[in-house]
Amino acid sequence: MQSDTYRGYALLRSVLKSGSQADVKTAVEYSRRVKLYPYSEATKSPKTIFVDATKAEYDSTIKYDDSFYQTLNDIVQQEPFLERDRVMIDVLKTIGIERGKSYNPDEKTKELFKAAVNEARDWLLYNYEKTKPFYEGSQWFFPASEENIKSVKSSFQLREIYPIDNRAVCYMIAFFSAKHLGESQYYLMTIKDKDGVLLKGNASYRVTVPANVPVKQYWSMTVYDRETHAFVKNMKWAGRSSQTPELKKNEDGTVTLYFGPKAPPEGESNWIPTDPNGDFEILTRFYGPTKALFDQSWKLTDLEKIK
């Protein structure tokens, strides 16, 4: 797997058989066996590198201020220009970002940059909120367009399409994209309740997940901070899934989940906490999705505000 850039990262996800402590332990033990080393040392005995990051904070959120342009300059100085990005080379020169030259914007320029990046953010949020629903009349949507999915698979080499708008929206809400997006896993997002009102962290909601969720592996729902599109900090947990050991099912096989700043009278087992001081969004993951999801013979219901 050859990288197009000089720096990069890799993600390795263990898909657990269940949410039991034994299966979680097995996954952790497997991760401890992963080795990372220079290829030149492959014939030696490379050491296992394992750093437990569960107690550390890594802030990968986008900064919507003039520092965004400093980050952009760092990339221009350190990374190769990809074919798909060459059109921006001369454009970046007009704002003082040029390969091999220092980047020193004055205070007035920094203020302009700050205004520009926030204008761009408003435009991205507008398009985000206008994403086409997955089901007709529903608030659930799949954020990536068909053109974007095709482009990612081809490393943006298809000459007939170049979906920079949808690509921008997707990378605003997520910091990576799977090469085969929507195949071995599928995602549905929502930022509104059934009445089309944005989800508020100080309100309470519920959703009933229909029985027989079309997955070969498992499904989950996770809450994110709508301001940063990252986990809500200092919460008891970020989501619930069909693998959550204490998850309660209804008699008909459905599962009712609750969202809000306080646990419902039914208890914490099916509750996902929210921050009362902000808005939130929900990402539903389907691992090993099956036909019923795509032909929509199975449909996910919208959130209902309960107070």
Image: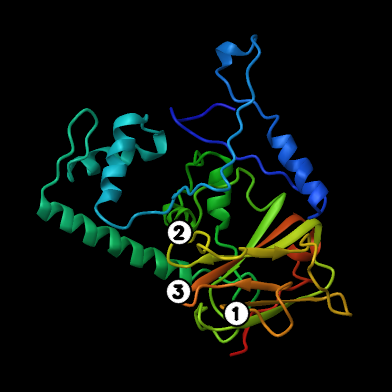
> Relative to 89, is 254 above or below?
below
What residue appears at the point 32 percent right and 61 percent down from the top-left corner? 120
Q: Amino acid at mark 3?
A: Gly
Residue 30's image quarter?
Answer: top right
In the image, what residue occupies the spot 39% across and 54% down? 62
Label 1 sits on a secondary structure element that is: loop
Q: Determine the secondary structure under disc 2.
A: helix
- Left or right of 158: which side holds 47? right
Which residue is identified by label 1? Answer: 262
The percent coordinates of residue 102 (x first, y second) are 17, 33
Q: Which residue is mark 3?
A: 278
Q: Residues within 10 Å of mark 3 (few under 14, many from 20)?
A: some
Please state which of the two labelled residues, at mark 1 or mark 3, is closer to the viewer: 1
Q: Nearer the viewer, mark 1 or mark 2?
A: 1
Residue 177 in the image: state x and y as whole percent: 55, 47
> What residue lies at 63% left-to-right and 80% top-to-bottom?
303
* Circle 1 crowding by C-alpha within 10 Å: few under 14, some 14–19, many from 20: some
Q: Earlier in the sequence, mark 1 or mark 2?
A: 2
**Between residues 130 and 187, which one lies in front from this camera angle?**
187
- Determine whether 31 is above or below 167 in the image: above
What distance separates the C-alpha of mark 1 from that of mark 3?
14 Å
Q: Nearer the viewer, residue 278 or 183?
A: 278
Q: Nearer the viewer, mark 3 or mark 2?
A: 3
**Marks 1 & 2, CB-CB < 8 Å contact:** no
| Placement of the N terminus among the 4 image quadrants | top right
Please tell me whether mark 3 sits on a helix, a strand or a loop. loop
What residue is shown with label 2?
Answer: 169
